[in-house]
Amino acid sequence: MLRRHANAVGATGAIVVLIVLPFIFPSRYFLGVLTLGAIYGIWAASWDFMSGLTGRENFGHALFIGTGAYAAGFLNTVWLANPWLSLPAAVAVAVAFSVAVGVPTLRLSGPYFALATLAAAAIMQRVTLIFWTYTGGEDGIQGIAPLLQSPLAFYYLALFCLAAVVATLLAIARSRWGLILRAIRGDEAACLASGHSTTFYKIAAFAISAAPAGLGGALYAHYQLQVSPQLFSVFVSVLIITMAYVGGIGSIYGAAGAAILLTVLTELLRGVGEFRLLAYSLVLIFVVFLRPDGLVAPLWRSMRGARE
């Protein structure tokens, strides 16, 4: 009971801080960084739900991000649909791709699933270049309409979506479904022997993970007002995985928090010029080697334990 109360207080406190930050630092540039941090948080939390709970690492999470973003771009610029329709459409498209990729690949064991998802994202990136007359090629899709005219309102929209995604994924992770997904990570053979269809649960978790990624892709498209093949790149997938590891694998909220912190850190390090990437890499090396369990989630657990 005390832990639930502490978690509720911590979540409320984090949301309140994120709500008031734009007023403490009234800079449009900083507001843009926070908005991107919230979108990255959606992507990192969604990756952590499936890969963090089941142990099946998805190296092609950019596939769902990119398909969601391109779905939003096509709907708005080609079919001239209301921008708000792109949010559910992006979720549906990402889920459809997750089922199409997950059904044949989630039966694979070892590193083969990770390689298959990586290949799927790379193939889709190549497809956007091959069919350049429809996708815009390297330039992507330009002129996407914004969801909201006010940058502050868009930030609060992204923050609301982040909070809703994290709360939903945490509720599933703490349910019977989450227990089965953790059992798959621990011993899939024993879980299968107990009568559970592990393939079904993995595909379902893959689809649930893809849905917020597609939503975040659509938000990104309407924020940047354009999409490009780079959204399918390995760099995007690796960046999301890095954020999840820094936050704490399997925590979901840790991945979201780390995404915001690392996005802000990246922008703060612009002041060191050419040494920015070096400083960023040193921070990541410190976390990976000295804090292999992550940084955000273990820190919160220690603070919560100290209060209890």
Image: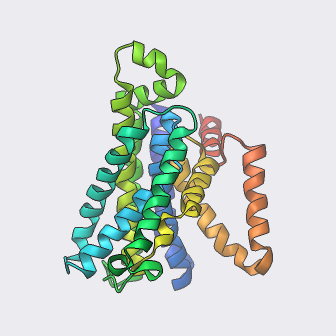
Give above or below for 10 relative to 154. above
Residue 111, image x and y in percent? 58, 38
> Is 87 on the left-hand or right-hand side of 132?
left
For image coordinates 35% across by 61% down, the residue present is 215
Q: Residue furthest top?
A: 193
Q: Residue furthest front?
A: 130
Residue 10, image x and y in percent? 51, 49
For image coordinates 43% across by 32% down, the residue present is 107
Query: Is the C terminus in the top left, top right, bottom left or bottom right quadrant?
Result: top right
Residue 67, image x and y in percent? 37, 63
Q: Out of 121 and 153, give the one closest to the viewer.
A: 121
Give above or below for 177 relative to 210. above
Query: Is the N terminus in the top left, top right, bottom left or bottom right quadrant?
Result: top left
Say if residue 152 shows up in the picture. Answer: no
Q: Out of 13 and 127, give the one closest to the viewer.
A: 127
- Which of the 4 quarters of the picture holds residue 181? top left
For image coordinates 60% across by 39% down, the residue present is 301
Say if residue 136 shows up in the picture. Answer: yes
Q: How is the image coloured?
A: rainbow
